[in-house]
Amino acid sequence: MSFLQEVNRRSGEQVQLCFQCFKCSLGCPVAFAMDYLPHQLMRLIQLEKREEVLNSHTIWLCAACETCTTRCPNGIDIAKVIDTLRQMAMEENKGTEKEIVAFHKSFLDTVYHLGRAHEVGLMALYKLRTKRFLDDLWLVPELVKRQKLSFRLSKVENLGEVKKIFKKAALWQK
Ligand code: SF4
Ligand code: SF4
């Protein structure tokens, strides 16, 4: 299976429809920091440039704001394609932005185990993964003061349903 076919199958999108109109990139708020702009990423997929795409910084810098998706005249959900590429890169241990990958995994871990985001758990997992234990610690007292940190590990009632979604997504990704 070609790289284009694999991305299409896993994302449910049709990347070959991209005709390089540039609208996605013009609206992207993170474009200034990307190595490949969103329209260039779509072109690289069409050209079967698997390594360039999965090793790009772009797929980790994307903020998933979906502006590109809204602007695409061909209805390509570019944000979803990029999310798929992140998953593929993770499976191949190719995350170029190690700290963003650590954050991404830590967030998913908290959602998987609790059914919701949990800031303290997320922070702890992130620090364990990055070993940056002392960074940003000065912010903690202020966050506690403003009651922005909850140390209670409360799970959602229907956690089983959340796990089913993870399982379904994993099957879909195969
Ligand atoms: S979803 Fe990502 S690529 Fe698309 S506009 Fe937002 S930041 Fe840019
Ligand atoms: S907006 Fe859609 S068609 Fe235009 S360059 Fe971006 S992905 Fe391609």
Image (cartoon, rainbow, N blue to C red):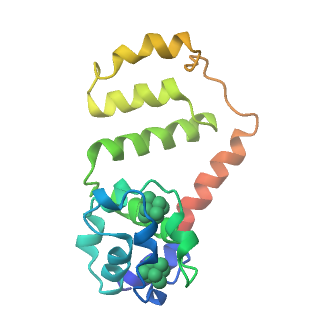
Q: What residue is rendered at 41% in x and 25% in y? A: 124
Task: Report the number of numbered marks.
Answer: 0
For the view shown, which residue lies furthest in the right direction?
A: 157
Above or below, 38 against 103 in this view is: below
Q: Residue 87: name its quadrant.
A: bottom left
Q: With 43 as the anchor, is 73 left or right in this view?
A: right
Q: Is residue 139 left or right of residue 168?
A: left
User: What residue is at 25 percent from the left and 64 percent from the top?
Assistant: 35
Q: Is residue 157 above or below residue 150?
A: below
Which residue is at the front of the view, 42 or 4? Answer: 42
**Snapshot quadrant of residue 51:** bottom left
Q: Quadrant of residue 5?
A: bottom left
Q: Residue at x 30, y 66 (%)?
A: 54
Residue 29 visible here: yes
The residue positioned farthest toward the front in the image shown: 26
Q: Position of residue 58 (x, y in %)?
A: 32, 61
Can I make out residue 92 in this image? Answer: no
Q: Which quadrant is home to the N terminus? A: bottom left
In the figure, is residue 112 to the left or right of 137?
right
In percent of width and height, residue 66 lies at 54, 62
| Towards the viewer: 68 or 16 | 68
User: Does 16 sit above or below residue 13?
Assistant: below
Give the x, y percent position of residue 30.
Answer: 38, 57
Q: Residue 19: horizontal and vertical position, in percent?
A: 43, 89
Quadrant of the image where one finds ligand 1: bottom left
Q: Say which residue appears at 62% left-offset and 37% top-offset.
A: 116
